[in-house]
Image (cartoon, rainbow, N blue to C red):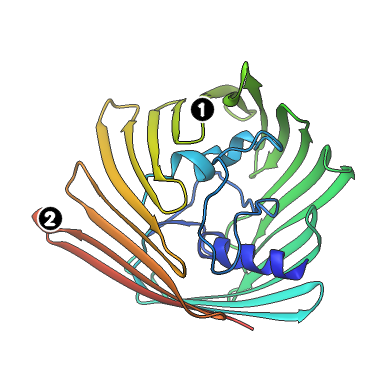
Amino acid sequence: MFKLASSKFKNTLRNFTTKCDGNNINNDDDDINIDLDDENLTDNNYKDDEPLLKKTPIMQYDTLYGNVFSKANVNTYDGFRTIVQKQVNLNTVVSHFHWLGSQNLPNPLYQYRIILPFSDDKVINVATDLDFNVEGEIRYPILSNKIQAKTNFQFGKKKKLSFYIELNDDISATQFKYTIEPEPKYQLSYVQNLFLPSLLFGGMGNYNSKHASIDTSYSIIYNPDNYLLAAQWDKSFKMIYLRKVNPNRVHLSTDLNIDEKGECEMSLSSEFFLKQSKLHMGIDSNLLLKSYIETNATPTTQLQFSAEICQPKNYYRFGFGICLQG
């Protein structure tokens, strides 16, 4: 059980610890989500034998961006990162995360994290930095895997508290979320299979009690074995097409983003899954080139190389990272 939890933690730690999307610190309303049910995240194995979206269990709506619409994005960073992960006992994982030299951070970042994976659906995950900014997540099943309760919290410079109730069955996923930040916010989402096992449709509504406003979002996803086609509409419009040239080795993807001002951006990317490494590279309509390489030097050591280059804007950023697992 621990090997499953620890390997997934290692693969998601880069985004989880700093809430980063590439080089940009994410300060929006998105909460932390760790998927301990995805059996594709295993050590030294980048194969993708199964469809990106499984029929059972159906993913929750707030995870669609990370699991679907970010497939064409190359997640890069600048500076130097180190992650040291240690198994203390059968039910405890601790991690030290250090990031320095980034142009997006005013000061070096250190974060200590402890994860208690009692089971796949019963998890306690808490982290703190040197300024005692604490964030974490607690999951607890109410009725097997059908109904689950979850809470996310942040204390320190930013205070936020969220409570979730999630209902899952073979063809649908429903989530209710209540957030205090500091004014109450309510969110209800629903995702369901439509007609075909590979066709998904979902929607989400957010109510802000302070402004008495409602925001909505809708997504449709078609995911047969060899390709993925998806679109999402909220205040902006997103569309992605991903082609599995070789389902175990090579993926090509393109996406289109139109913001609420009508400005468009497109990107192309390719992803190569090798035996002990992964290469992801792409270019967007602003001529921004991105590349990210991760390779397993040893069974317990992973090296990461990241780069962003935009010659017309004289923009160059490079990153290097090392992950050690004990």
Residue 58: image tag: none
> Looking at numbered disc 2 in the image, what kind of residue is underneath it?
Lys
Tell me the quadrant of the picture where the N terminus can be found: bottom right
The quadrant of the rendering that contains the C terminus is bottom right
Q: Which mark is residue 221?
A: 1
Instruction: Determine whether, in the image, residue 305 is placed left or right of residue 3.
Output: left
Q: Position of residue 272 (x, y in %)?
A: 37, 56
Residue under the image location 50 percent in, 26 percent down = 222
From the image, tell me which residue sits under label 2.
Answer: 313
On the rendered structure, is 201 left or right of 286? right
- Does dot 2 land on a helix, a strand or a loop? helix
In the rendered image, residue 185, in percent from the top left (x then y), is placed at 66, 34
Q: Residue at x 77, y 74 (%)?
A: 92
Q: Position of residue 246 (x, y in %)?
A: 41, 47
Query: Where is 167 relative to 139, above or below?
Result: above
Mark 1, secondary structure of its residue: strand
Which mark's residue is nearer the viewer, 2 or 1?
1
Q: Quadrant of residue 315?
A: bottom left
Q: Is residue 296 left or right of residue 208?
A: left
Extreme residue toward the left, this view: 312
Q: Earlier in the sequence, mark 2 or mark 1?
A: 1
Camera sees residue 81: no
| Image position, residue 201 (x, y; %) | 58, 22
- CA gap between label 2 and label 1 equals 35 Å
Where, by quadrant of the figure, is residue 129 drawn? bottom right
Q: Residues within 10 Å of mark 1 (few under 14, many from 20)?
A: many
Identify which residue, 170 or 209, lies in the foreground.
Answer: 170
Q: Quick one: 80 or 183, which is closer to the camera?
A: 80
Q: On the image, which quarter does residue 60 sit in?
A: top right
Amino acid at dot 1: Ile
